[in-house]
Image: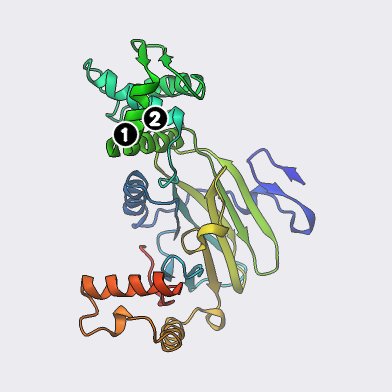
Amino acid sequence: MTTTTSGLRTGGTAATTAATLVPSGAVRENDALKPSLKGLKEAAQNGGASSTMFLPAAGTRYDAFAFSYHTGLAKEMNLKGIKEGQTVKGHIAINISGHATGGRADQLAALAITKLAGQGIDLEKATAKNDKLFAGLYKAAQSAGWSGDATLRAEGLPEVKITADELSKFAASDDGKWAANDALRRQFAMTNTYNVRVTLPNGERLELRNVARNKPDQAEYATSIPVEFPAMKGNTVVEAWPTGSAEVAGYVEARRYHVHIGEEHFYSEKKGAEAAEKYMDAHPEIRWAARAARPNSNAAYEAEEADLAKHHVSPPPFPYADVA
């Protein structure tokens, strides 16, 4: 196995060149790219798991569908008007894993930020300078050890002393838990790199490894990655994930696309809905929200969720429009 200078790793019979995934020129941005990045950023900051959007280049006609978490179903995309032998271009939009739980270093960094705020030093405001100061503070927190009192020293900031007792109380509070998780999210946003894998219908696998954020000098909760790959009839699998994460397997609903080229290979929304109806028929023990007297009410969804949890049943595999 080898790695090209552009970060594309290849190996075995699926060997490729970097040029097959790295765009040969500029990729026209889909109108949905910026709103998608904004939504992914907000989702990560609010504790959402890392998710992926594949947004074909502007001018590309397509339909895209997604499925509820726990269905185990990847997203489906039909590319219209694309012929075999042409090139598919677009952007991967991806965010950090916002649902990770902060540990001692994150708790120390978060409490230190709280203490500094009491001195009139606000590190929470998102600026390049604050991110640099946060990086130094976080490094000091990581070096503070796993127990006992801690003294954090970071360039450009006053020394911060934290006792084991006050850290314990802070970590046990709701505000402290959120602040520690937020510190970890910020650390991810300042250090994350990302990976993209495209598996073509003929089995060729194209990969980009450890792709840097768009703004490596500051926190970035959502990143866009331009890609291109050859159009082949059939099902092309597009996947992306943050380096060091659980990759795709644990959350295929948000990190994998089946991209279909050629009308005979298109995903059928109608057949997908029919499959979901049959699935509900097979589980009469569930008070399905779609079949409730008031299907769009909160009570209907709460009843369905309670039944799904009680009977260990997955959500119905109804296809719905992907965010794009």
Q: Where is residue 178 in the image (x, y as percent from the top left)?
A: 32, 39
The amino acid type, in three-letter code, at marker 2 is Gln
Above or below, 47 relative to 250:
above
Q: Residue at x 37, y 34 (%)?
A: 180
Q: Is mark 2 on a helix, strand or loop?
A: helix
Q: Where is residue 217 in the image (x, y as percent from the top left)?
A: 44, 28
Name the one closer to the observer, 58 or 150. 150
What numbered label is drawn on residue 107?
2
Q: Distance between the residues labelled 2 and 1?
A: 7 Å
Name the one closer to the observer, 53 or 298. 298
Q: Which residue is drawn at 36% across and 10% down?
A: 159
| Residue at the front extreme, as displayed | 165
Q: Name the residue under label 1.
A: 176
Q: Is mark 1 on a helix, strand or loop?
A: helix
Q: Along the horizontal axis of the image, is 88 left or right of 156?
A: right
What numbered label is drawn on residue 38?
none
Above or below, 189 relative to 40:
above
Badges 2 and 1: C-beta atoms under 8 Å apart? yes
The amino acid type, in three-letter code, at marker 1 is Gly
